Image (cartoon, rainbow, N blue to C red):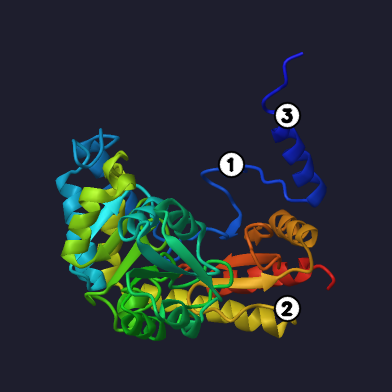
């Protein structure tokens, strides 16, 4: 009998089941009654009438899809408008919109490095940055989490091209990177700094202008940032922001830009509407941080082990992967949706509930959520 070429898939599936690490899709209803503390809709804009109307208008005007790569037919006037306003809002010279934040990180890392480059990567970086390092074929040094001294040590003595990459706010525990210190280490070592600000845009900085703006690094000639349009802006897509010559370089060399279909007009229209709303209503960013702080205060006050949030992510530790899964399931049964992070998604091996603070949550909803989480908490 011929050997089944996919037998190995069944073996891996069995191993995942034994370890309690099986993942499954759970389609949500459009009118779900559950309280959502799992999505990344930090400003509560994904269903805002102004945002959804902008998406519908863009689809009617430009079509359902962008029809091709942006270098062929996929770049509309709407994309250019979004790039211009996004760069100006965040304080950078130029921006380039891609189909996802993942694609933006792959584009930035691979286009700004290569075989002759040293890339210094934080151990807790998002998978998209890690994959960018792998695809770049650069020499990659993985350094301890949020350790500017380790970055400086890796760069010491290196006389070629170098790039340090980090998240601004790490998606698991919600802690912020020491960006000023990292920038200083990069400048001493002659390296550029690339920061994924997916969880900072809309939450940190003046009026939500991002972690780079808060650190005084926006617009610096040796700093590049990536953002996603799918979190605070409630839409979909990603962007790279930086000096104009860097953006021009990406247009000509970044494979996830050149060979990918452009972002759909509806997503671009929705993101632009959200960006303009944030500019008009900067208090949304402040409220998101306030909600995160209140969740942390109430959860720790109830005796749970929560990580202090630097932005909108609040992480609550669970005693085991199975306990985390049961905890999240019990919360859902009680009307609350929370994130559940466990190995291998968390490289430190610590399972967690991951809560996302939203600017549109009321004080009553915050109290209800904490009551559900504490009532369902497993024994340590």
**Which of the two discs, 2 and 1, labels the residue nearer the N terminus?**
1
**Residue position marked by numbered label 2 in the rendering:** 304
Q: Nearer the viewer, residue 275 or 49?
A: 275
Neighbour class for label 1 at 10 Å: few (<14), some, many (≥20)?
few
- In the figure, is residue 180 to the left or right of 374? left
- Name which quarter of the figure residue 161 lies in: bottom left
Where disc 2 sits, the SS reads loop
**Cα–Cα gap, marks 2 and 1:** 30 Å
Q: Residue furthest right?
A: 379
Q: CA distance from mark 3 to mark 2?
A: 43 Å
Q: Does 41 sit above or below residue 155?
A: above
Where 21 falls versus 14 (above or below)? Answer: below
Q: Quadrant of the C terminus?
A: bottom right
Mark with earlier residue (3, 2): 3
The disc, 1 or 3, on the residue closer to the chain's N-terminal end is 3
Q: Position of residue 326 (x, y in %)?
A: 78, 57
Expressed as whole percent of the image width and height from the top left, the position of residue 80 reads: 17, 52
- Residue at 30% over, 72% down: 281
Locate residue 152 relative to residue 114 in the image: left or right.
right
From the viewer's perspective, is residue 196 above or below residue 300? above
Which disc number belongs to residue 27?
1
Which type of secondary structure does the marked residue at label 3 adopt? helix
Q: Residue at x 51, y 79 (%)?
A: 146
Q: Which residue is mark 3?
A: 7
């Amino acid at each position: 009998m011929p050997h089944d070429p996919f037998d190995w898939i069944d073996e891996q599936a069995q191993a995942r089941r034994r370890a309690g690490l099986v993942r499954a899709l759970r389609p949500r209803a459009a009118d779900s009654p559950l309280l959502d503390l799992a999505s990344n809709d930090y400003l509560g804009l994904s269903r805002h009438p102004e945002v959804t109307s902008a998406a519908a208008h863009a689809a009617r005007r430009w079509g359902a899809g962008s029809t091709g790569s942006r270098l062929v037919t996929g770049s509309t006037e709407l994309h250019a408008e979004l790039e211009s306003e996004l760069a100006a809002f965040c304080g950078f010279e130029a921006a380039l919109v891609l189909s996802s934040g993942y694609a933006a990180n792959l584009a930035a890392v691979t286009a700004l490095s290569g075989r002759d480059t040293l890339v210094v990567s934080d151990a807790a970086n998002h998978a998209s940055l890690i994959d960018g390092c792998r695809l770049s074929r650069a020499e990659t040094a993985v350094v301890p989490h949020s350790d500017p001294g380790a970055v400086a040590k890796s760069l010491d003595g290196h006389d070629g091209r170098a790039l340090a990459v980090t998240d601004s706010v790490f998606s698991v525990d919600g802690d912020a990177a020491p960006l000023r210190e990292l920038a200083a280490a990069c400048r001493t070592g002659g390296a550029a700094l690339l920061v994924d600000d997916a969880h900072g845009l809309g939450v940190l900085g003046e009026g939500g202008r991002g972690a780079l703006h808060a650190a005084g690094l926006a617009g610096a000639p040796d700093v590049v940032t990536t953002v996603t349009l799918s979190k605070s802006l409630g839409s979909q897509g990603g962007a790279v922001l930086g000096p104009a010559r860097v953006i021009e370089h990406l247009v000509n060399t970044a494979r996830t830009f050149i060979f990918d279909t452009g972002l759909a007009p509806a997503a671009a229209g929705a993101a632009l509407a959200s960006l303009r709303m944030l500019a008009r209503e900067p208090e949304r960013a402040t409220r998101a941080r306030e909600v995160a702080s209140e969740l942390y205060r109430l959860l720790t006050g109830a005796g749970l082990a929560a990580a202090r949030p630097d932005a909108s992510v609040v992480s609550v530790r669970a005693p085991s992967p199975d306990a985390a899964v049961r905890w999240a399931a019990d919360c859902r049964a009680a009307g609350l949706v929370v994130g559940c992070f466990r190995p291998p998604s968390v490289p430190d091996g610590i399972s967690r509930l991951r809560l996302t603070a939203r600017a549109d949550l009321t004080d009553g909803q915050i109290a209800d959520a904490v009551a559900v989480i504490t009532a369902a908490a497993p024994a340590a």
